[in-house]
Image (tube, rainbow, N blue to C red):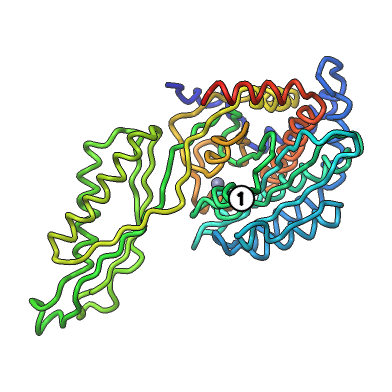
Amino acid sequence: MNRRPPRGTLLRTARHQAHEVVVAHALAATRPAEPFAEAKQRLATAVEANRAEILDLSHRIHANPEPAFEEHQAATWIAELIARRGFAVEHPAGRLATAIRGRLRGGRAGERPRIGILAEYDALPGLGHGCGHNTMAASGVGAALALASVADELPGEIVFLGCPAEERGSGKQWMIEDGLFDGLDAALLFHPNDRTSSSIALLASVDVEVTFTGRQAHAASEPWMGRNALDALVLLFQSIGLWRQQLRPEARVHGIVLEGGTAANIIPSRAVGRFMLRSFDEGYFSEIQERFGEMVEGAALATGCQGDTIFSGGSSTMRGNEVLRQRFSANLVAYGLEDGPLDLDHVGSSDMGNVSQRLPTIHPYLAIAPLDTPGHSTAFRDAAATEAADDATLLAATLVSQTAYELFADPALVEAAWREFRATT
Ligand SMILES: [Zn+2]
């Protein structure tokens, strides 16, 4: 298992890295050995030319957080911006009202490749942009604008995909089912983090909503006539707590209470919990879902209630693509930044996993916050609107556009990525 590198070796803070980026910009342009160095420099210049619009978008989305499936304002801003820059925009795209597809044909002959430049923009309820998706929206748009500036020299098509509902509901899976990923040769999306690494792992994950139904009664005068739905939910939490002793270390089960009654003097007839189950191993993942269902039944039986379980929005493990990852990593290193190792100590889930099971995909991390800033926290939310986050957003736009350019300009690279993809089935 890869361990976290000692403090100080990997981690320069994002601010620190950002300063290095400015210096490295000039250096990178002077490296003749780097493939497509001149084009990559023009892409970096194009991102810089769009700096104000990219960062304004990031800040506006950060200041107006919208949860999964409700990202109407963010989606409208993004759709309008890329439409102004020549993309043929569908919004909504497919069945999700806040999904976007923008397409721009290259000026050179040839249908292929079609390279997907992705963006996310949903926030966390009650927290805001605690996952920094505002930077993903802005960098995805930035990469698309940079590529649009060189579209005349590209074959194929630039396909921008605005992807809602990553935090809950696995919006990308809906978009896959709606055919929005059909015909794509690759998908590229950066994610902000407290560390920089092009290698990532993801846990398979599923959302579970559990509703217990009992019978109301006066809690003092006829409690024996009631069936306490909240008791069932409490019992489920206790079962999960004990279950953890026997769970594999990398498995995760966690939840919250959505409804637990309306007054202390009413025996609650309805209690609702929302949970997530996760695992690295798809086989074990099925096993724990089945076990969870049995625990719901057990809690219902013990309390004389009825338990209903709805599983939804599954996301998959990450099927990495070394060919793409190495290109992104080389572009990152060309800016004088260190590409950290795969970190298996801090692993989450994303519907980018679903995309990665379908086509060559990368989902690299760039640091926007000091090491050990917890994700999904107010600290990370605040970090997502700092100058360091802005620098990382611009850098991500540059690196994604440069990696995409290589795919457009080098058909053998696309072929190699697909060869690897097929070989890892
Ligand atoms: Zn996220």
Give how far across and how far down residue 147 sits, in percent: 82, 40
The amino acid at mark 1 is His
99 or 217: nearer the eye?
99
User: Which residue is at the front of the view, 260 or 319?
Assistant: 319
| 95 is higher (above) or lower (below) than 240 | below
- Who's the residue at 75% across and 23% down the image? 334
Determine whether the beta carbon of the residue marked 1 sits less than 8 angstroms from the nearest atom of ligand 1. Answer: yes
Left/right of residue 250 with respect to residue 371 in the rendered view:
left
The residue under the point 30% across, 64% down is: 211
Q: Examine the image and state in which quarter residue 13 appears.
A: top right
Residue on which the image places disc 1: 133
Quarter of the image containing the N terminus? top left
The correct choice, above or below, for 332 with respect to 270 in the image is above
The residue at the point 68 percent across, 61 percent down is 92
Q: Which picture quadrant has residue 117?
A: top right
Category of crowding for the residue at label 1, using alpha-carbon neighbours closer than 10 angstroms: few (below 14), some (14–19), many (at least 20): many
Image spot of residue 23 (x, y percent): 80, 29
Q: In this rendering, is residue 133 above or below 188?
A: below
Q: Position of residue 393 (x, y in %)?
A: 70, 43
> x, y percentage for residue 239?
20, 50
Q: Is residue 105 left or right of residue 271?
A: right
Position of 235 compared to 57: left or right? left
* In-image side of 173 versus 401 (left or right): left
